[in-house]
Image (cartoon, grey):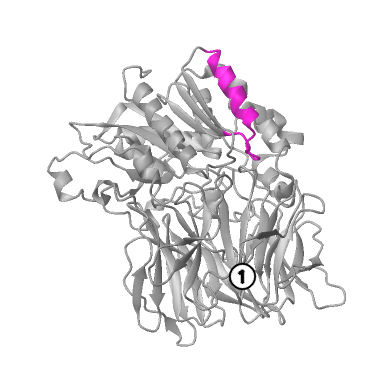
Amino acid sequence: MRNLRTQVFIGVLMISLAACGKQAEPIAEPEGLAHGISTPQYSAEAFYQTTTYGMASAGGFAFSDDGSGLLISSDQTGVFNAYRLSVDGADAIPLTSSDDNAIFAVSWFPVDDRILYTYDSGGNELYHVVALELDGTSSDLTPGENHTAQFVRWHDDHQSFYITTTERNQRNFDLYRYSTDDYSRELVFENPGFAIAAVSGDGRWLALDKPRTSADSDIYIVDLSSENPVPELITPHEGNIEYATFTIQSDNRHLVYGTNEFGEFRQAWSHNLETGEKSELVVADWDVSYVSNSGSGRYLTYGVNVDARTEVTLRDLEAGKEAELPKLPFGAISNVRFSGDESHIALIVNADNSPSNIHVIDLNEGNTRQLTDALNPEINQEHLVTSEVVRYKSFDGLQIPSILYKPHGASAANPAPALVLVHGGPGGQTRTGYRAMVQHLVNHGYAILGANNRGSSGYGKTFYHLDDKRHGEEDLQDIVYGRTYLESLEWVDAKRIGVIGGSYGGYMVAAALAFEPEVFDVGIDIFGVTNWVRTLESIPPWWEDFKEALYDEMGDPATDAERHRRISPLFHAENIVKPLLVIQGANDPRVLQVESDELVAAVQKNEVPVEYVVFPDEGHGFTKRVNRITASDAYVRFLDTYLKGEETVN
């Protein structure tokens, strides 16, 4: 489901999207493949032996104090752990050794080699923040059960840092300041019901986001140095306008925020915290995704979501121009991190046919070094598939932007079975970039259409809100018309088309099979909502601050229960007549296991083929490699049997 903490305002556009940007040119196959050489089929294990890398959090220090090492997260053992990656290219050194719960690196300490990391238990999203000491022992800074915590940032004095935790009432994130030396702490702000968005480096200013509805939100600031620190609204307005904090800049005087006040797409603006003066900072023809700056404030970094791929710009404010970077491999750039002296930056580059790799750039010398090689060497990169951005018409003529993957060797003479892939959310976006699940399916001969149905983010605020309180209706028809589009492609087998999706996408799968039972030949539901009545009444308590906005979009169970029942596949499961695979994590706090249990039991009564896989040690999304391999194998085995094979139901 939509992560409301970060998706308060992502928007879309109803006009013809073909006019909004140049459509990608079809990708030519590698020369050998174009001449009929078949692509070998790789196992799920081969794709998932590709290593996933991540960098320390945006609020922390990715570079060690001396600049010689990077703090990263990696699943190279099969479970995520924290590692030290040398900038000279030496092998990563493990700093933690969990073999069960995923550990994600947060930050180096600013003056020594201690680190902060975070973990939960089996995917339950009750996160702890932990300090790893120099002697290898760990200190849990947020002990206890039934609450969750998040690291925020370091204080400029490097003697303290900030953490939020819901320990007081399991709902609201209160802000604490911790001592770097002994981890003693003080309550800085008892949160009455805001989202804590940013703290200034000097500890004076606190930025709070307040979503009122899915289309309307505000920003408040608190002067923590005042005798009576109370939230002050800085975005008074009329009508539906979205505002959300990006960052407080290094000068501790300017708050940078995003807003769609001036058009369809999100712009970045600056607010002077002392004078209240506002000024335009970044404007683009697409949504500005994020804005950050370096420790000294010399460099400004921002990303723009350009047709489902992030483009990053680095401004040298001292020189008054964009910084020229050395050539990097093609792909989307993310996780830009500066060294303490700002002589180097680390970043991640990701593309459809190239998993995320970490690069370090020397800004003085203008050279770059790739520190990781994530792709499993067993896989030939030429055998991976690069996507194409396409658009197709839905039932009412609305253009649906999508990401299309064509298997090597697919042709009119050798048409491929296909899947419509539905993203999570509501309000997510299918984007370009490497996904082991997708490449595994395509490698086994399945075309994939990643449909960004109405309600998806990234295409303007109008498009984004087209599905409000109409979920399972018009947006479902966009998915149905995804099949119509696939049938129009001569290299697709029009008689073998299924639907697959996770979270909200899993709901759409179940909805498609229940409400349009003859459209798709099979469905794969990955921890999807089946009973909106229950789901909306059982949201995690730490979503309390965003419940009003969630109910505004989805409907309040107290008043909309009848509609929720009408759009819930569970109550219409007798209509499901096509084979179904359901995948679920037992510890999922968002979509409870009972949702999938009941759907599977209901479909079994129809005497329809239904398969069910439950992971006892996972939550909403799978973090352990062995489970991801098991799931991906299940997808292909199920599709080979019921979509590609003789048992296909037509």
- Please state, as top left, top right, bottom left or bottom right, where the C terminus lies in the image: top left
Nearest the eye: 159 or 343: 159
Q: Which residue is mark 1?
A: 247
Q: Is residue 137 above or below residue 230?
A: above
Q: Neighbour class for label 1 at 10 Å: few (<14), some, many (≥20)?
A: many
The residue stretch that appears in magenta: 585-606
Residue, x 43% and y 83% (percent of image)? 321
271 magenta-colored: no
With 167 as the anchor, is 33 left or right in this view?
left
Q: Is residue 366 above or below residue 604?
A: below
Residue, x 40% and y 41% (percent of image)? 437
Q: Position of residue 217 (x, y in %)?
A: 68, 58
With 421 as the anchor, is 272 left or right in this view?
right
Kind of residue at badge 1 = Thr
With 43 as the anchor, is 120 left or right in this view?
right
597 magenta-colored: yes
Q: Does dot 1 land on a helix, a strand or a loop?
A: strand
| Tally of numbered discs | 1
Residue, x 49% and y 42% (percent of image)? 423
Q: Is residue 286 visible?
A: no
Q: Position of residue 126 (x, y in %)?
A: 68, 48
Q: Which image quarter: residue 297?
A: bottom right
Q: Which image quarter: residue 412?
A: top left
Q: Which image quarter: residue 425?
A: top right
Q: Position of residue 69 (x, y in %)?
A: 48, 71
- Please state, as top left, top right, bottom left or bottom right, where the N terminus lies in the image: top right
Q: Position of residue 334 (x, y in %)?
A: 46, 63
Q: Is residue 349 above or below residue 321?
A: above
With 598 as the anchor, is 148 left or right in this view?
right
